[in-house]
Image: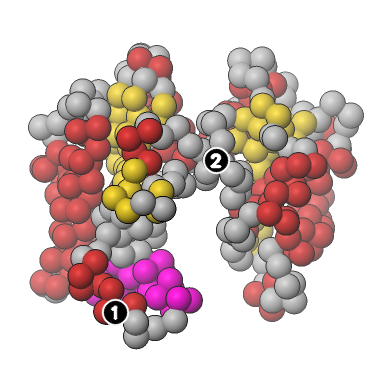
Amino acid sequence: MKKILVINPGSTSTKIAYYEDKKERLNKNVHHETAELEKFATIADQYDYRLSLIQSFLEDEGIDFTQLDAAVGRGGSLPPVEAGAYLVNDQMIDWLVNKTNVHHASNLGAMLANGFREKSKADCIAMVYDPITVDQYHELARVSGLKGVKRTSIGHALNMRAIALKTAADLNKPYEDANFIIAHLGSGSTISAHQKGRMIDYSLDDEGPFSVERTGSLSLKEFIPFCYQMTQEEITAWTRKKGGMISYLGTNSGLEVEERILAGDEEARLILEAMAYQVAKGIGELATVLSGKVDQIVITGGLAYSERLMNWITERVSFIAPVSSVPGEFEMEALRNGALRVLTGEEKAREFE
């Protein structure tokens, strides 16, 4: 029986799950007080605070973290890497603390996993799996249209690959023999093209359909003058946190939008249908990347719970391939499954360099 601790840090909380093989024994969200987090100058400075809080929580729940076989964290803002498992080492931690340009809470995943490895038995491993910077782009996908500006692979790799692997298993078809389009729809949205086991292109949350909080692609002719009215920090906030659905409707709650539509709010209906329209366009765009050879289109993420949104998307793209939904996100299970594959020898963990 393999004992696995999964750690998924977010901006104000850390998701914790403990598994014995595939059996879930604990799955909780450990919340962090904003006032406490504000005491730290950097994300990395939160390490000791979060580690101590999580340790106390596990002790209160009766989880013995001294006998772990693996501690696996969500992969943070590493340089471009191949998909799969990476053992946490000093070089990885140094990159996440001192070299990355993206300071996000997920960077703590590797550090916290390593912290629990140090508290556990000698053969316990610390690893990350499918970081957000998984890069399997086709060379044609890197060309942006402006020399000096490269398209970069950064998105919901962990959940999208997990859904692709699950879909392949459901179809009784090796992932390496299948072609999928996976759309992760949430506060930010990413659509990915999977060709024979590799994510060869994305429609990213800054260049594809608008989402709950992000603008997606914008008309440059209309947007450039807008940029001169604000600082870089302000314009980034508008495109990343205050754009998309929230800019039109003043809410980031899909449930509230559904209720407003049911109450006869035509603007709410227009914006949600426009989101579905743009998602469908993004799926259609990536279908051309796969030359129209698509085994399955899968919608995942929080917005996949909306039957209305699903129906609007399906109406436009079902001619390409069968459409299914896997609502929510499965990051904890994906991290567990990655650790299990490494522990059982099914997959070999890489060394980060």
Q: Which residues are magenta?
A: 232-248
Q: Secondary structure at mark 1?
A: helix
The image quarter in which residue 122 lies: top right
In the picture, the disc for residue 172 is none
Is residue 25 shown to the viewer in this render? no
Q: Residue at x 39, y 57 (%)?
A: 188
Majority secondary structure of the magenta segment? helix
Q: Is residue 185 above or below residue 21?
A: below
| Quadrant of the snapshot with the N terminus | top right
Q: Which residue is mark 2?
A: 80
Residue 110 is situated, as x and y percent measured from the top left of the image, at: 70, 45
Q: Residue at x 61, y 15 (%)?
A: 346
Task: From the viewer's perspective, tell me whether residue 101 is left or right of residue 255.
Answer: right
Q: Earlier in the sequence, mark 1 or mark 2?
A: 2
**What is the three-letter code of the residue carrying label 2?**
Pro
Q: Residue at x 81, y 38 (%)?
A: 117
Q: Is residue 255 above or below residue 139?
A: below
Q: Residues within 10 Å of mark 2 (few under 14, many from 20)?
A: some
Q: Residues within 10 Å of mark 1 (few under 14, many from 20)?
A: few
Residue with the most extreme front position: 147
Task: From the viewer's perspective, tell me whether residue 74 is left or right of residue 211.
Answer: right
Residue 107 is situated, as x and y percent measured from the top left of the image, at: 65, 52
Q: Is residue 26 above or below residue 125?
A: below
